[in-house]
Amino acid sequence: MENQVRVGILGVTGYAGVELARIISSHPNAKLTYIVSHSYVGQKLSEVYPHLQNVVDLTCEELDVKTAQQRCDVVFTALPHGASKEVIPALYEAGVKIIDLSGDFRYNDIRVYEQWYHQEHTAPELLEKSVYGLPELHRAEIKKADLIGNPGCYTTCSILGLAPLLSAKICDTKNIIIDAKSGVSGAGRGLGIDYHFCECTENMKAYKLATHRHTSEIEQELSLVAGETIMLSFSPHLVPMKRGIFATSYANLNKSISHQEVVSLYQEFYKGEPFVRIYESGLPESNHVAGSNFVDIGFCIDERLNRIIIVSAIDNLFKGAAGQAVQNMNLLFGLEETAGISAAGYYL
Amino acid sequence: MENQVRVGILGVTGYAGVELARIISSHPNAKLTYIVSHSYVGQKLSEVYPHLQNVVDLTCEELDVKTAQQRCDVVFTALPHGASKEVIPALYEAGVKIIDLSGDFRYNDIRVYEQWYHQEHTAPELLEKSVYGLPELHRAEIKKADLIGNPGCYTTCSILGLAPLLSAKICDTKNIIIDAKSGVSGAGRGLGIDYHFCECTENMKAYKLATHRHTSEIEQELSLVAGETIMLSFSPHLVPMKRGIFATSYANLNKSISHQEVVSLYQEFYKGEPFVRIYESGLPESNHVAGSNFVDIGFCIDERLNRIIIVSAIDNLFKGAAGQAVQNMNLLFGLEETAGISAAGYYL
Amino acid sequence: MENQVRVGILGVTGYAGVELARIISSHPNAKLTYIVSHSYVGQKLSEVYPHLQNVVDLTCEELDVKTAQQRCDVVFTALPHGASKEVIPALYEAGVKIIDLSGDFRYNDIRVYEQWYHQEHTAPELLEKSVYGLPELHRAEIKKADLIGNPGCYTTCSILGLAPLLSAKICDTKNIIIDAKSGVSGAGRGLGIDYHFCECTENMKAYKLATHRHTSEIEQELSLVAGETIMLSFSPHLVPMKRGIFATSYANLNKSISHQEVVSLYQEFYKGEPFVRIYESGLPESNHVAGSNFVDIGFCIDERLNRIIIVSAIDNLFKGAAGQAVQNMNLLFGLEETAGISAAGYYL
Amino acid sequence: MENQVRVGILGVTGYAGVELARIISSHPNAKLTYIVSHSYVGQKLSEVYPHLQNVVDLTCEELDVKTAQQRCDVVFTALPHGASKEVIPALYEAGVKIIDLSGDFRYNDIRVYEQWYHQEHTAPELLEKSVYGLPELHRAEIKKADLIGNPGCYTTCSILGLAPLLSAKICDTKNIIIDAKSGVSGAGRGLGIDYHFCECTENMKAYKLATHRHTSEIEQELSLVAGETIMLSFSPHLVPMKRGIFATSYANLNKSISHQEVVSLYQEFYKGEPFVRIYESGLPESNHVAGSNFVDIGFCIDERLNRIIIVSAIDNLFKGAAGQAVQNMNLLFGLEETAGISAAGYYL
């Protein structure tokens, strides 16, 4: 238990925050030392989330940079949108490693951020230093980073599904469509009539078509992989389940290629990746990954139309948020990359 | 279309309110003339609830007693708790028939109300004039009433399940237990973390054990039927479905009685009732009644323990609120009792 | 009650069959006279589906063409795949009007049927006489038909969502993608591990990508509308809800067009249609149509990519099966087209 | 990795079996060496359950006692009802430790088994040697056992909720009622119309009232604790969720006792128990325990009626089956009792 990474979580009572607390609670090389929740100061986390009774018995505290500096080697910031921009520069100054789960530090180009978030970025110098925390594409930089912008849930699922295809330059880059479906926990714990049980259950809908912020993240990363500017359709949908991101991506092939060749191409691209599972046959379903850090990817080639359909699935709270954040922490501190996040999901 | 009952709904954008609007929209002898929603004044109801597009195209208005008086023969008040007490006396004065869906006018004894609702009743003289709107027990009074206290959802299901048993005096009246389960729409459309999709789905819980207000309504009505003071356990639970009240009621028999005798006793008690269905075998399930005004009742006699278990089910928004309110309206205006509410539920 | 259309349902215990029985039970101009279920001969339908107690009290019978001929003006065939081909020719001979809910009589070209269904068609001469039962496109022929091939659920939703666009020739016809999502009742009542509650709830998946039979139906009808051969991607998904088809369709625009122009174009195309609702703003959700015969259509124009995204939604058992079948019956017998199917859905 | 307990699972493709495989896959002191599934011989478990890809890559084999003897220190038998009776005697002879998840080895009195299971017991001599695997009541015997009858899901939840009360002799033992609610996975992976998604979702029901086999198990264990014969009502219900057992138990108090005294009594009874969590205030919900080995217990004292209501919750697949089986394995092999099963559940 010596030499364990000391972990702080800011915004611990949100869904990503509590998933982080749960994962850290059984991580072999890390321990939780500081949990912050503005709304629940003085209450035990296990009073807010009773499943953590006898497992995480820490009490929520106010945010204090000094305390974070003294008690933590790394801080995960899972704050409501906007709140992280205030505290992150101070933590950075204090020398604490930061893994930020907001959108604020995911961009290479500040103009893209400001265009899609409709606000000024208040820490442009930190944005430059931050690293995009998608290990499958940026592992080397992550290991040396001080500030990691942990990717969004839709983003992780979409990018990993399409990167090998674009890297291989075997599709038309002008007609890419990602039709994505999310469980409701992706919207967080905040209240809103759209997330009322009676409005969600037995219902589904599309939202923010053509305008969802994650579009810009996906385009940024796929442009890097493709070596050209990628612009694509990204269409989010809400489906009545708690967890899960499911992306159905479409692209027109620019050459004839067999199913097996696509499988091999993806297997090669993701060789050695501990969390990517390529389907030789069949297709992922959201409960194949629920509760785990895996991303599952499968394929259908429509020979009639010379079009490929790629199906990818992740757990939005795990590989799409808390699990990936821990994967980044593991890389940052030289731990086994899979430590604490290697278990299978729960399926049922 | 002449001589149709002109209907107003106060609180039309709540779940009971919109269910009323839906039922009235296809009622052969009633038409909607006035809909009130403080939060949505100036908006069409079909903007708030798009399923009503092309079906109900009225616009939500502010509450105004004069308007109600001019446009309505009857007003359903489905207001947030407390709000109805202000407006109902004024409507009553104005000579409008009132069917109130709150708890305010359901009591014979003001002290019971004040004890369980922890507040003073502000219209005690109206409480005296009001009639408890459970047609199966109070049909004659309902027909002549000016103000009807429409029963609660748990209440309707529980009372109708137990009334014949208590009327027949064949059980110990000291050990009655009602273990009741409700879908989430019973809690209304208001926001609360307890009704967030992610907290409800795949979850169940008990709440307000031994203290739920509907206990007092059930005891009032069953005491009348039994001819003695009944005190019982009423335990509400929340289960992850939209609609439905399901009550499992327990009583110790004071004599030996066969399953068939119980069936006959119930059939006799509810003879001619259009909405009560007695199961000769098998048991009700909540989707047997979802979307309909039926109350289904089945039985199990545990001979080993000489105990009877009664299972009753209703749709909380229909027979437990809006449908029963329309049944009361039909009685009040001399219409066919089943008009507009006779259809089967939707099962799927 | 005189002159009511006498209705038979073959396959009454399947989900489409029982929905037909429910709709007919409250239809003002039709009555159920003959219900057939091979598996439940001699049982009341209300024993199999207790929500129909006191509403439909007919008993399931064996199939007999003579009986159908004597008792029925029209027969709905909602039989398991393949079974309808045997009985329909005999019924046709006997002069009974037939509305078939299988895929067998939906095709103009027998080769298309045989290619997508991988079997020979056994009644090619009837196939020629049959009419495709989509009133919005084939109303005139339906009125004179003797045999109607009632469209599939995915099909109805997809065709109606895209027809005006293709009719107006304002999009590239080579890059049309329909990403469709269905509730589980679309798979019927048959048992299969894929439809086990524990495998469906909190799970979603894609299936039959590029090979689903409804693709051919959609292409047939859209080709007619477009005046050219349309080939497109149709991708079905299963989402954890009972009812609902939700289609997100993509096409590249070949000219610049505003949102309002698209709305007008659709409003014009569907002028006078009682069941099509065009959204001037906002988007359909599956619970806007659940329990009703409406098809709701909304739009998003992605100006960045000059692409249109069309969202359409229906209830798969209603407008996608039983409701549309009744709409066809109404047309066939000169009844009000909306008779028995005009009510709003239930939303909750 | 030396000295790991070698584990076999018979019936690995059922829901309890695959949950066992998942738990063992991350158990620090055990490894899976033999998995048997009659229906899937030759297939990888991860083909049947893709969430286990890269985690459990064993192939399902036919049952062979020799193989079990050679490869396993312990075998979990999670076979369809009846199948275990054949194989268990042979395994027992071969000296393999057995933890049986069926009902066959849970009884002290063969007559009780035969009365509730309506069949002869075929291995009465083994029944005598078997130990009831509820660690909180039988830890000492479990440690020395060769054959453990792992308790049922309803049973575990009910017994642990009531044992301290009966041990303290503070209630009337003639009026105990357990109203229990279960998620659908309790019914296993077998097909049946009752477990079809469309029949389960948005629906709930009671079943096997007064006749469910688990009644006899509960009565056996509570009689031991109480020191007198206990007979009680046990009422199972099916609610639309995957996992979870939720029991609401009622008993009349024979003395006045405060809430805090009850809490203390339970805390004392379960002192040192790693998996029992007593609620000082509030009540358990099923998602407090989902995915974990915890049993949560809370209380409501109804002073008006001098009645106690006890709410207890477990995960039926975990503490109600696989997790408890692993807890028994840990005890059997002298491992840390919480090894491999100490993590918090997933809540969301």
Image: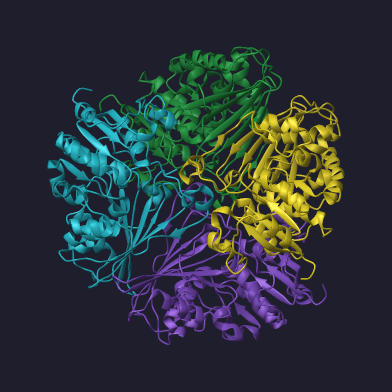
Chain colours: A purple, B green, C cyan, D yellow
Quadrant where the N terminus of chain C sits is top left
Q: Nearer the viewer, residue B266 or D59?
A: D59
Location of residue C280 in the rendering, given as x and y in whole percent from the top left corner = 30, 57
Quadrant where the C terminus of chain C sits is top left
**Left or right: where C252 falls relative to D279:** left
Location of residue C71 in the rendering, given as x and y in whole percent from the top left corner = 22, 26
Say above or below: D127 vs B169.
below
Q: Nearer the viewer, residue B233 or C49?
A: C49
Quadrant in the rendering for residue C33: top left
Residue B118 appears in the figure:
no
Say above or below: A83 vs A264.
above
Residue drawn at (32%, 43%), measured in percent from left and top? B57
Say above or below: C162 vs D266.
below
**Left or right: where C64 falls relative to C183:** left
Q: Nearer the viewer, residue B10 or B289?
A: B289
Location of residue D271 in the rendering, given as x and y in whole percent from the top left corner = 86, 48
